[in-house]
Image: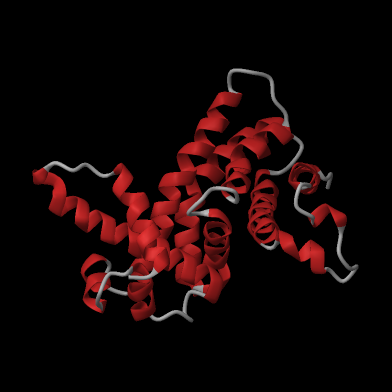
Amino acid sequence: MTRRARHNRDVMSKSSTSTPASRSDAALTSTKERLLLEAMRLFARNGMNAVSLRRIVAAAGAGNLSALHYHFGNRESVVREVAQMLKRILEPRCLERLAALDSRAHGVRDALDAAFGPMIDMLGEPGLGRDAVCFIGRLGWDFGEEGQHISADLHRELMEQIHARLVVLLPGLEPEILKFRLLLTMNSLYYGISYRSYAMRSPFGALSIGRRGNEVQERALFMDYLESGITHPL
């Protein structure tokens, strides 16, 4: 078993029950979760089609290829399951923050931060981090039309909720144009924050904003960029 697989096993075991009746179910869940986490990591770093299923199984310490086929079946199913796992994590956070806006006065910046802030926050979350962000970003361009459909399902409720709020806040902007700008915003978000270290290797040389310790300022500037793209007059 690999070092990473042992770490994932230990993390999963902390939240699982230990009663005799549930041990077999917990073991199956733990294996499935390890496979999902390793698939997410390897797909994010190497590409959706550049990683063999056998490599995912080995990284997860599952023993043999039949474990992955037992839980998922094929590559597309693995990609879908990872996306669903991330949806279960992200969607409630985003929708909860959007719903909280209804109880107070708010502007475009508040709505964008509520909708997309959890993705930025996820960068610092152990076990997810940049791998989770990169995986979602890759769905739209690295896994063909099927990946785009998976991405659309992952973001549908969130995008509908943020669009409904921004229509009210930006009455002079045509709804169709607003939808297109939101798609561009979402793409900029994933590519921008997942490759944030590029600021240290940019065509301009190393930018101080990309140094460790400047994350708060970097986030503020990035949200400025997203807000200006949404609100720019026609």
Q: In which quarter of the image is residue 40?
A: bottom left
| Residue found at x 60% / y 51% | 123
Residue 2 as seen in the image, left or right of residue 20: right
Q: Which residue is drawn at 54% across and 38% down?
A: 161
Q: Residue furthest left?
A: 21
For image coordinates 79% across by 48% down, the residue present is 225
Residue situated in front as seen by the camera: 174 or 187: 187
Total label count?
Answer: 0
Relative horizontal placement of residue 68, taking residue 6 as reference (left or right):
left
- Residue 97 drawn above or below residue 190: above
Extreme residue in the right direction: 204
Task: Give the image quarter of residue 57.
Answer: bottom left
Give percent across and percent down for residue 151.
49, 59
The x, y position of residue 228, in whole percent, is 81, 45
The location of residue 101, given as percent across then percent down, is 60, 25
Q: In what quadrant of the picture does the N terminus appear?
A: bottom left
Residue at image position (71%, 44%) is: 174
Evaluate whether residue 83 shows in this view. yes
Asked whether 160 or 85 is in front, the reply is 85
Q: In this view, does 166 lie above or below 121?
A: above
Describe residue 19's horizontal placement relative to residue 84 as left or right.
left
Q: Can residue 81 be seen in this view?
A: no
103 with respect to 225 (left or right): left
Quadrant of residue 15 within the rendered picture = top left
Image location (x, y in percent) of residue 83: 43, 58
